[in-house]
Image (cartoon, grey):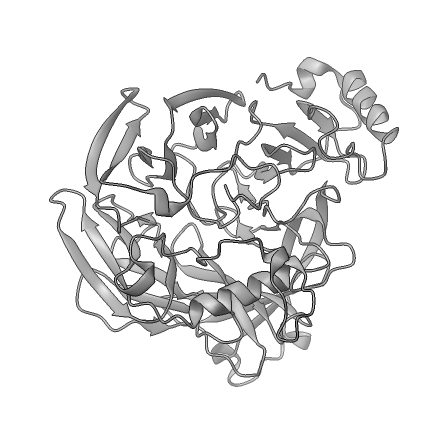
Amino acid sequence: MKFLMVAALGYTSVMAMTAQAQDRPATLMAAPGSETPPEEWVDATTGHRVVRISDEPGSSSNYFNVNSYTPDGRWMAYSSPSGIMALDLRTFQSRLIVPGSVSLQFVGHRTGDVYYINTIEQTQGHDANSAHTPGAAVRSPDSDRQGQRAIMAYSFATGQSRMITTLDPEYSIATINADETLFAGARNTGDAGVGVNPGSVMANRSPDDEVGPNGEELTYAEGREVQINRRLNMKIPMEIFTIDIGTGEKKTITASTDWLNHLQFSPTDPGLLLYCHEGNWHVVDRMWLVRVDRPDTPKLIHTRTMNMEIAGHEWWSQDGSTVWYDLQTPRGEDFWVAGYNVETGKRTWNHLDRNSWGVHFNSNEDTTLFSSDGGDAEMAAHAPDGKYIWLLRPRAIPDVAGISAANSASLITPGVLDPEQLVDLRNHDYRSEPNASFTPDGKWLVFRSNMWGPGHVYAVELAKPSATAN
């Protein structure tokens, strides 16, 4: 796809696109599935420019907390039905770098190599290629995995792939450490879960088909809670393990019958691993840190203080100093993006309104900006007007008249996130979550959407087109 810069199009062309868009419904989009998405448009609701990155329907960007960018800021990896694509962030042109039926995992923080598995399987983010996800390229179930699979790495320097190691059927990897010496993953070690992707809810039907305890009809979101709770109560034995990339040695880090998931190595500390106890958020103690380079006891990083308080969908700041997460006190009523400094234990809570809550949040390189990918009315926030990609600007709440409490340094640092709508997603089906991420230069947010029907990868420019361009 050619990236049509405003300078090349001319201001008249962009304004013409905007005028055409305003002839459509207020959402800017046509009815889902009714036409091919344009390569570029100015969102009539928000005034921001949106570019379609992918050419093939069924393409998908990575899960929100999985690194997709090379350390030099030039390339972004994403998935398509043809294989793994690389987007040149200088030109916004994509090219196929790994053809075939493969599963993109992540991009290395040190080398920029693109790591993948040489078979099709579910990757992080339950919605990415689910049979129940609109616009997805549906992939075979994990139970179809047979035999060993290879972990491969594509090098931009050589243009070639090499094999790193092999995985037995019951193993999967979720993350790579900062110096690219270790993989980490979780696996089911007993009972019915052996060989199944550890993040799976082990459900063979859509959440839409679940019913409540008295046979009442449930929403999709409620049905998913039922499925998650069912999986949680199975108490399947699990372990978190590492694989030494140089030697292939496997090491068990922790083991339990808790549902272990959402593994993320620190982007800067090679020995620090963040993971979660998966399950219904108001039930589990979710977020944990553990060192993998020495014997260590996992540390819980957020303790619930009220019933129905929830915390989750955690991610690392890019400098590795802070774990950020969605916090609700209680669920569906009061909304925060909270941070925990891993060195000092200092906590920051940034408040936001119901509509600008998102399924996933993210932050830019220096944490001066946050993003939200919004949500529909069925989700935790029950937002009446939340289906947007949002830009969130943090604003500190200072001491009144510069007068500080004696213990202020030990208290939570409060703030507010001021929202701006970037992309109108009122035609998006949130069974596929947009999973926005900032590009390394901080100028764009990349996300995936089915707002035109087929799943595609898009980017929205944070700055609005200049009204004086010519």
Q: How many marks?
A: 0
Query: Where does the image place residue 57, in percent across and percent down from the top left?
Result: 58, 28
Residue 460 visible in the displayed image: yes
In the rendered view, would you say 423 is above or below 265? above
- Name the residue: 57% across, 53% down: 206
- Name the residue: 69% across, 72% down: 333
Q: Is 341 positioned to the left or the right of 425 in the image?
A: left
Query: Where does the image place residue 235, in percent across and percent down from the top left?
Result: 36, 71
Quarter where residue 96 is shown: top left
- Name the residue: 20% across, 36% down: 164
Query: Where does the image place residue 328, in percent across and percent down from the top left?
Result: 60, 70
Q: Is 392 positioned to the left or the right of 27 in the image?
A: left
Quarter where residue 465 is shown: top right
Q: Is 443 positioned to the left or the right of 427 in the image?
A: left
Tell which of 451 and 12 is nearer to you: 451
In the rendered view, would you say 192 is above or below 425? below
Q: Is 375 positioned to the left or the right of 337 in the image?
A: right
Query: Where does the image place residue 124, in percent across and percent down from the top left?
Result: 43, 48
Quadrant of the frame with the N terminus: top right
Quadrant of the frame with the C terminus: top right
Residue 470 visible in the displayed image: no
- Name the residue: 36% across, 32% down: 102
Tell which of 389 and 466 is nearer to you: 389
Tell which of 268 and 254 is nearer to you: 254
Farthest residue to the right: give it. 23
Farthest residue to the bottom: give it. 406
Quarter where residue 46 is shown: top right
In the rendered view, would you say 372 is above or below 96? below
